[in-house]
Image: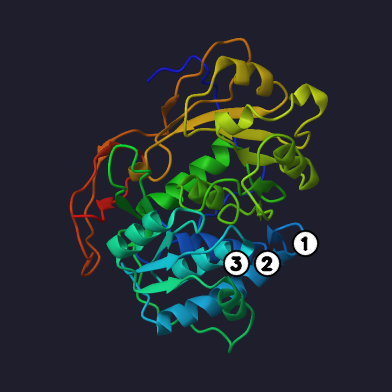
């Protein structure tokens, strides 16, 4: 696909977790590190850098790593492991992010279930996914993260690129929501490419805006704690209008993914709104020419598109320019190709395997509908 908005995207000046020169290597496949390996590489590289904050508390990469290891050890003892699902029915918080990383370190796949969803939808997701472990008590999760014996996750099962990393349920707009299991295979490639395209790295501050149950939240994870940046998780989201503007300014947000509908509620940036914002990612719905005209000047604005099955993003634009009309969905992310792979790393035991989805993406993942 040709995009008139496309321009070459300069690489970030900061070291990137997925760059060939410094990427963590998977014991199984050096070219395809797992989600847990991407995170632990930054714990080793920048242990004292801020990894996660809610504006009141801040955890360094080392502190976040220790907490995630503690919870991972608990999950392993509860039966978590490769291709087993751990449901996280937790509100937007630092603890939720730590729990997602803990699941990855335990070798399992995390299923984020937004507690703000209607009870029927939550019940459907949990019954359909059949999680081995469910964490739904924020206070207990905080205790497990903060206390306990020295962590030992050596008993975690061996994880390879074709094991499940996370499960996301579709919106159900065309029928019953369906679960999609995304493997580790595409996460390293996407994280590396996204760090370059969105120009993000150490020292940057990424807003956690998306619902935990939307795969845009995984994008936010990839371009923050898997890329050496700081993920900012202010309480009481999501936000709109003046409240969102205050969050962007008070937390000095440098990178954010904001859907066009929410972006349209913000005060005009000409009035000083989002003065720290250097990269603005739009997606999930069509972006108007008017929003590009208003927000592209003075920052890097990227339109991104992709179904869950393609490991978050399948196409994106280069930096958008004002005055060039409605943006397209851009071109393929690096090397396009219609691919689909099946798990080949030991026994694969999904409870209900239905079908494999084919999609043009340079970082293929085995994606399986959970619902039969």
> For the point 25% across and 65% down, which residue is it?
345
- Extreme residue in the bottom direction: 149
Q: Position of residue 191 (x, y in %)?
A: 50, 47
Write down the residue under mark 1.
56
Residue under label 2, please give it. 47
The answer to whether residue 19 is visible is no
Crowding at mark 2 (Cα within 10 Å: few <14, some 14-19, many 20+) = some
Dot 3 surroundings within 10 Å: few (below 14), some, or many (20 or more)? Answer: many
Residue 7 or residue 283, whichever sits in front: 283
Q: Distance between the residues labelled 3 and 1?
A: 13 Å
Q: What residue sits 61% from the left and 20% below the top? A: 292
Secondary structure under tag 2 reads loop
Quadrant assignment for the N terminus: top left
Q: Name the residue under label 3.
A: 95
In the picture, the disc for residue 338 is none
**Disc number lying in front (3 or 2):** 3
Decide: few, some or many residues near mark 1? Use Cα within 10 Å; few <14, some 14-19, many ≥20: few
Q: Looking at the image, which is closer to me, 176 or 289? A: 176
Rendered view: 285 above or below 17 = above
In this picture, is 53 found above or below 86? above
Left or right for 31, reference 203: left
Instruction: Judge from the rendering whether residue 88 lies leftward or rightward of residue 256; answer left or right.
Output: left
Q: Is mark 1 on a helix, strand or loop?
A: loop
Mark 2 or mark 1: name the one nearer the start of the chain: 2
Task: Let me know if residue 304 appears in the view.
Answer: yes
C-alpha distance separating marks 2 and 1: 20 Å
């Amino acid at each position: 696909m040709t995009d008139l908005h496309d321009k070459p995207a300069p690489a970030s000046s900061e070291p990137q977790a997925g760059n060939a020169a410094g990427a963590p290597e998977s014991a199984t496949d050096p070219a395809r590190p797992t989600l847990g390996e991407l995170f632990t590489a930054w714990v080793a590289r920048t242990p004292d850098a801020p990894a996660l904050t809610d504006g009141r508390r801040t955890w360094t990469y080392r502190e976040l790593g220790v907490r995630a290891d503690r919870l991972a050890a608990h999950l392993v003892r509860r039966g978590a492991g490769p291709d087993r699902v751990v449901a996280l029915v937790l509100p937007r918080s630092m603890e939720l992010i730590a729990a997602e990383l803990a699941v990855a370190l335990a070798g399992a796949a995390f299923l984020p279930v937004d507690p703000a969803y209607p009870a029927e939808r939550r019940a459907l997701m949990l019954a359909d996914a059949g999680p081995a472990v469910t964490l739904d008590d924020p206070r207990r999760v905080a205790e497990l993260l903060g206390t306990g014996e020295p962590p030992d996750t050596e008993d975690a099962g061996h994880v390879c690129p074709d094991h499940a990393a996370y499960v996301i349920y579709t919106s159900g707009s065309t029928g019953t929501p369906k679960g999609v299991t995304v493997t580790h295979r595409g996460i390293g490639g996407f994280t590396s490419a996204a760090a370059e395209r969105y120009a993000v790295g150490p020292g940057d501050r990424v807003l956690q805006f998306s619902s935990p149950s939307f795969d845009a939240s995984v994008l936010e994870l990839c371009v923050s704690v898997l890329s050496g940046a700081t993920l900012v998780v202010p309480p009481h989201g999501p936000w709109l209008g003046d409240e969102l503007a205050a969050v962007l300014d008070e937390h000095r947000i440098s990178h954010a993914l904001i859907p066009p509908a929410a972006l349209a509620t913000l005060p005009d940036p000409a009035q000083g709104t989002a003065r720290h914002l250097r990269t603005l990612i739009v997606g999930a719905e069509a972006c108007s020419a008017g929003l590009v005209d208003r927000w592209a000047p003075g920052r890097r604005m990227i339109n991104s598109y992709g179904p869950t099955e393609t490991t978050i993003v399948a196409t994106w634009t280069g930096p958008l320019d004002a005055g060039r009309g409605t943006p397209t969905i851009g071109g393929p992310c690096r090397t396009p190709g219609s691919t689909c792979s099946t798990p080949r790393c030991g026994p694969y035991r999904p409870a209900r395997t239905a079908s494999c989805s084919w999609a043009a993406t340079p970082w293929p993942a085995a994606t399986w509908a959970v619902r039969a």
